[in-house]
Amino acid sequence: MFFVATRKDGIGEKDIYKSSRIENGEWSDPEILSTTINTEYDEDGPFLSSDGKTLYFSSKGHEGIGGYDFFKSELVNDNWSTPVNMGIPFNSPADDIYLVMQDNNEIGFFSSNREGNLGAMDIYGFDISCPNIENTELRGIVYNKSNKLPLEATLALINTDNKTVNETKSLAENGKFLMIAPPENTYKLTVNAVGFNSQTVNVTIPKQCEFYPLFSEIMLENIKKDGQDYQVATLRNSFFNTADAIAKAQKDGDINTSQITNEVPLNKTANDKDFEHDKLLMALTRTIDTSNTNLAYTIISDTIKVDKPDTTGLITFYQEFFGYNIREVNTNHPDYIKMIEGALIRIKATGKISIDIESSASKVPTKTFKSNINLASLRGDEAKAVILKSLTDKGVNADNIEINKINSIVSGPRYTGDYKNTEKYHKFQYVKITIK
């Protein structure tokens, strides 16, 4: 028998106790469950599965969505395992409590005061007898919230046994990622992004009876508070059939994407077949009230204290090769974007940056720019103007940017009239940008 009490030997407010019927028919002295189950806050509504192997209960102390949340713990070697949050749709931002199930653990009832109910605490019924699919897709985007640039990051999903289920990398050019994982599980999602400290956030992927891809928008940000450095990770998890939700929203009225284009780096690449879908989805999520929705949608935020922003592994070098008489720097190149991101992180960590620029023209004659050295000089000036604009557009004070004297040169083999030999001269038509 499991029951709830507030006693002097308790761990928190309400705690869960266990008592067993002994041979003479009487009940043993109550034994409080360990801190694996009980916390310094309220636990309530214990329910034991018919096979005695799964304990369901509600808690305000374990990490949840809000109020009382449902958790389950498995009996392993006579010990209760670390409780797992049962996630949406069982849990809501309100109080969810008193879960009971039939023998198959698929049909049952619980009480909740969630949005959309008829009174204070109402009774809800559920049937989850559909088979869970083996694996689902978790797609998403990782970006720097401060400068709205995509982040190249390594992401790992780790299960409750501390085993890595899947690992992937987000793309530097657009921050997109994709990984596969079994649904109806709680994972630790570890994010390692260049310029940020490693951060881990708990993520619960709900059960799926039929396949549809899930989407997670991951934002990282370095902030200062009371003179200390902190790192904030925020996840906007769309764990529902996003295609159906977008179609319904468009039927009810157009989705406004103007806000999302200012918040998220939307870099369309040739292989990104989901670009328009993702833009519409992220715009739609801005209209969702997490406390009043039937969609499996949650926003999770986690803050950690750091010594200072991590500058190891930053991309602080960019080289671009030009065609004949070309001098415009391609600011949409993924490597240029990564260099700007690295510069912003370095400024945040050290206060200022120093920039070296080397520009070169080949020895193929140019009439357009009067002389080869003039072309090389113009390439250097162009690079200087472009990088200054890129940084100041991101809010960097120009006083924090020091650009050293530009080294403009004419280099390469002697010209022999073979101007069509691009392989011979192309590598001597360039600009190099180094940030220190």
Image: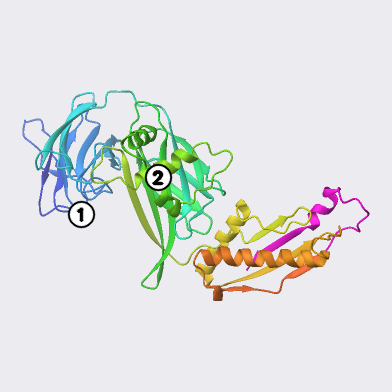
In the current view of this chain or complex, which residue is farthest to the front? Answer: 368
For residue 259, which numbered disc appears in the image?
A: none
The magenta segment is: 410-436
Front residue of this view, candidates 274 and 196: 274
Residue flagged by tag 1: what amino acid is it?
A: Glu
Q: Residue at x 18, y 25 (%)?
A: 102
Residue flagged by tag 2: what amino acid is it?
A: Met
Residue 1 visible in the displayed image: no
Residue that carries the numbered disc 2 in the rendered image: 282
Q: Please provide percent x and percent y for residue 177.
A: 50, 42
Residue that carries the numbered disc 1 in the rendered image: 40
Q: Please provide percent x and percent y for residue 24.
A: 6, 31
Q: Is residue 108 left or right of residue 416?
A: left
Residue 155 visible in the displayed image: yes
Q: Residue at x 65, y 67 (%)?
A: 384
> Where, by quadrant of the figure, is residue 248 drawn?
top left
Q: Is residue 321 left or right of residue 213?
A: right
Q: CA distance from mark 1 to mark 2?
A: 37 Å
Q: Residue at x 30, y 43 (%)?
A: 82
In the displayed structure, 114 sits above or below 326; it is above
Q: Please provide percent x and percent y for residue 366.
A: 83, 60
Badge 2 marks a residue whose secondary structure is helix
> Where, by quadrant of the figure, is residue 240 drawn?
top left
